[in-house]
Image: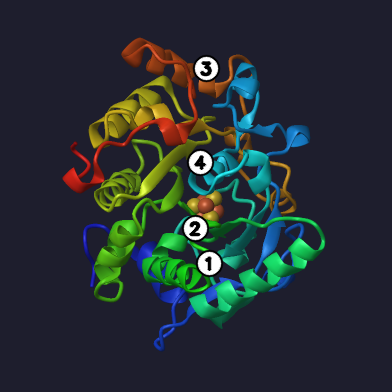
Amino acid sequence: MTTPSANRAIQRAYTQVRTPTGQILLTDLTKTKLGAVQNRFFRLFVPVKRSRLRLPTGLPEFSGMRHLATLSDSPVLAAARLGGHWSDHNLAAICHVAACNLRCPYCYVEFRHLSAQDSFRTTAADLVGAFVALRRERQEAGEQVSILRISGGEPLLVPEFVADVHDELRRHDLAEICLLKVESNMTAFAYALESAPAGTTARLHSIGGLAVHVTIHPTPDDADWPRVLMGLRRALELGIDVYPAIGGAGWSDAHLSDLYAALAELAPDLPLRLAVRPFNLSYDALTTRRGLDHYAVPAGPSPSMRWEQLTTAKRGRRYLQCPRHLVSLGDPAKGAAS
Ligand code: SF4
């Protein structure tokens, strides 16, 4: 069924990532060129890395670099939720849902891995079983893996799978010591919620603060823009802990202004959570892509400085003045308008 929240690409990707028997498809990471692949489920990733300038710039010790660094604050959120210092949570296990409805030119995933090629069927129980085994292995090697990140592809094509993974983490007594983090483009979420098995919306709501990092790819004049806003609205209604980001290059001042107004309408302080993270165009998957010039960071002031002009003018706040998880989204129980 076609609904206003869907287009053909969303419907196709929605179908590609699930089987009639309730399994979902993940990319077999051993068949990719991605780094630090551990097995078909997971690759490892160090979120905060000084040498790559991926830093939690909302922290005082890094705040002087907020316009130079690419914000990477999952470990800070993990520490706030789970206890300890952010450096205790600086290792993530990442799995990839096997399809996406978009084809961003700068996507570091090979396009064939966005349409379920090189994928395998699995369940949340199998995924979390593999996570438990990986944690044990790394623990024996003296490392702690405390972030399980569902990436892709587009994870919110399968919101029921996200709820299943959270249930499995609970079953293994991991929900209080590990952070489940989801990455999304948010364009397919409204449709997936309408189409997913009954009860999915309530299950996501009951998680209470699922962490979702949302990269907003369409600009406000793009056909997918209303879908992003619809997805964000639904996410906020469900109490999802939303962390928006844009690449910044290719966004005009008018785009940024429209983005500010749209985010502020969804939740007054949501613009203060926005990260401007220029895309890394050096990945292997990008060597044969066209049209990347448009997304290279232009000479001159960093794109985040243009965002700071808006936050300063409208709220008297600097860009990423404080850690994003400390910026309130209002009371989820009252909905996004609170
Ligand atoms: S939304 Fe994300 S996964 Fe999908 S094509 Fe764009 S960058 Fe890649």
Give amino acid for label 4. Ala
Q: Quadrant of residue 229?
A: top left
Task: Give the residue at x 55% y 60%.
Answer: 152
Residue with the mark numbered 2: 176
Using the image as rendered, state which of residue 104 and residue 179 is in the foreground. Answer: 179
In the rendering, which numbered label is found on residue 80? 4
Q: Is residue 246 above or below residue 67?
A: below
Q: Residues within 10 Å of mark 1 (few under 14, many from 20)?
A: many
Using the image as rendered, state which of residue 11 and residue 205 is in the foreground. Answer: 205
Kindly state the secondary structure of the residue where label 4 is placed.
helix
CB contact under 8 Å: marks 2 and 4: no
Kindly state the secondary structure of the residue where label 1 is placed.
loop
- Alpha carbon separation for disc pair 2 and 3: 37 Å
CB contact under 8 Å: marks 2 and 3: no
Give amino acid for label 2. Glu
The disc, 2 or 4, on the residue closer to the chain's N-terminal end is: 4
Residue with the mark numbered 1: 97
Q: Is residue 230 above or below residue 54?
A: below
The disc, 3 or 1, on the residue closer to the chain's N-terminal end is: 1
Residue with the mark numbered 3: 305
Percent across and percent down for residue 14 are 40, 70
Give amino acid for label 1. Val
The disc, 2 or 1, on the residue closer to the chain's N-terminal end is: 1
